[in-house]
Amino acid sequence: MVHAEAGATSLWVMTGTADAEALAEHCATIGKHLDVGERALSVDELRAAPPTVVMYVHEQQVGDIVVLPPLGAAQVRPNRAPACHITHACMPDREQGRQSSAIAHFASHARLVGSRARQ
């Protein structure tokens, strides 16, 4: 995280590479499409994922770098105040090989209340 108001953090929820496909299948069964930037899953949608899907939670502070597993699913939500994240994503593209893109994302205020991973 490169900037946040005083005391603000961001909450990351992510899966490992091996669990991303199972989470994508879960999303398909609830009528959602797991895709980059399409939408955030609600806490209830995350909780309803199969128990075999391991989810990791990390609370990020200014200066922290979050390294995501290759092809793992990830979602970030700001806690308490808006935050600015700069991300670099490598996504596979069957037609064009591997493509990279840099995205500056300004997240609006949102809260993630509880999660299966906190239990």
Image (tube, helix red, strand yellow):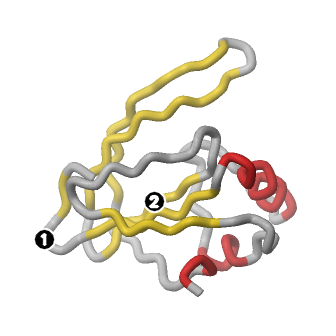
Q: Characterize the local packing of mark 2: few (<14), some (14-19) or many (20 or more) Cα atoms within 10 angstroms.
A: some
Numbered mark located on residue 59 in the image: none
Q: Characterize the local packing of mark 1: few (<14), some (14-19) or many (20 or more) Cα atoms within 10 angstroms.
A: few
Q: How many marks?
A: 2
Tell me the quarter of the image containing the C terminus. Answer: bottom right
Q: Nearer the viewer, residue 12 or 70?
A: 70
Question: Percent from the top left, x then y, of residue 50?
Answer: 81, 70
Q: Residue at x 81, y 61 (%)?
A: 26
Q: Which residue is mark 1?
A: 6
Q: Nearer the viewer, residue 41 or 16?
A: 16
Question: Percent from the top left, x then y, of residue 19?
Answer: 74, 54
In this image, 110 relative to 32: left or right? left
In this image, 22 relative to 40: left or right? right
Numbered mark located on residue 76 in the image: 2
Q: Name the residue at the right extreme.
A: 29
In this image, 59 relative to 55: left or right? left
In this image, 56 relative to 106: left or right? right
Q: Residue at x 69, y 72 (%)?
A: 45
Q: CA distance from mark 2 to mark 1?
A: 18 Å
